[in-house]
Amino acid sequence: MDVAAGSVEAWVHRARVAFVVGKGGVGTSTVAAALAVLAADGGANVLLVSVDGKPGLGPLLGGKPLSAREQTLHSTAAGGRIRARTISPEQSFLDYLELKGFGGMLRRVAAAASFDVIAGSTPGMEHLLVLGKIKELDRERVADLIVVDAPPAGHAAPFLRSAAALQDAVSSGPIREQADEVAALLADHGRCHGVLVTLPEDTPVSETIELAYDLEDRLGLALAPLVVNGCWPDRPGLTMTATTAARKQGVTVTAATKRSLDAVVRFGRARVDAQRAQLDRLDRELPLPRVHLPRLPVARLLPEHLDRLAAALGTEPIAPDVERTGGRR
């Protein structure tokens, strides 16, 4: 399995478009925001895009909920900045008509009359319109890096595969031309990469493994180091009973306290053991370098938490244990 070489920090300054993809609930939006912070802190001009209408990226970065109107969310001493917006199929269709020379009034009439018909009669067309807009933004070099918060894994594959599907279905014309250009973007390792995000849990890992091979084999999409989000710290004290720990510290605890502490230790040990099993599985079945992001036990993520996650993204990736890697390549 091929992967973009080097650390995430080095990679992020080489890529031009990054699709952040993962199962719903694994924190793809958070990782997309942290990735944008990492790039901006290095001086990059970043455009952060939400393609499924989720407005929460704006408040996460200290701004207003996202909309189709671009807003600047973050500026750095190094000259970097983060702008953000949503991209919808409807707006992408209007922009496409404008690109093709339709006037304002005619464009609105054509969009109202034909968008639903086209979207309903051409499977994958809505996705292709959004990808086409991202392709145009890259072509216009509106930013050093476009970070795309892609739909959850179950929808991400159809979203990213839409160009290939329409290449199979349409032989010529503007739709085929758009599909060819989007497919070329996705397969261009100098322009576009996928950032897969998972939790160290069974179902997210399973979906991530399948998605990784699907994206690489079907689309030729280059993969950046895998991001494992929400990792529990591996504390040595979890191997100790409360009685042993109390004796080492020279303190006395009640029997009830010992029972409570032992229950906490068992829980923590079970979580760490389960996490280790999933990381071992990734070594075997998805031989990608990995970056581990810490689990943040907070009720609500704030901009300062993104700084911590961005710093973790900038660390050197963990290489897979090649001696135990026997999975697909």
Image (spheres, grey):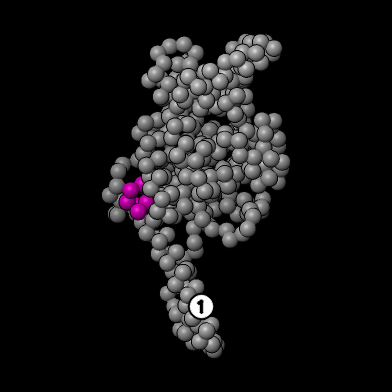
Percent x, y for residue 209?
A: 38, 45
Q: Nearer the viewer, residue 45 or 184?
A: 184
Q: Nearer the viewer, residue 326 or 68?
A: 68
Q: Is residue 196 among the parts visible in the rendering?
A: yes
- Residue placed under numbered mark 1 in the picture: 261
Dominant secondary structure, magenta? helix
Percent x, y for residue 149?
A: 55, 38
Q: Is 300 left or right of 247, judged from the image as shown?
A: right
Write down the quadrant of residue 63 in the picture.
Answer: top right
| Residue occupying image coordinates x 41% and y 50% | 203
Image quarter hosting the C terminus = top left
Percent x, y for residue 113?
A: 60, 15
Q: Is residue 317 among the parts visible in the rendering?
A: no
The residue type indicated by label 1 comes to: Leu
The answer to whether residue 286 is magenta is yes
Q: Is 89 left or right of 212, judged from the image as shown?
A: right
Image quarter hosting the N terminus = top left
Q: Which residues are magenta?
A: 281-287
Q: Is residue 106 above or below residue 146?
A: above
Q: Is residue 214 above or below residue 256?
A: above
Percent x, y for residue 325?
A: 30, 51
| Residue occupying image coordinates x 40% and y 35% | 215
Q: Which residue appears farthest toward the left when viewing the image?
A: 326
| Residue occupying image coordinates x 46% and y 40% | 153
Q: Nearer the viewer, residue 322 or 212?
A: 212
Label 1: which secondary element: helix
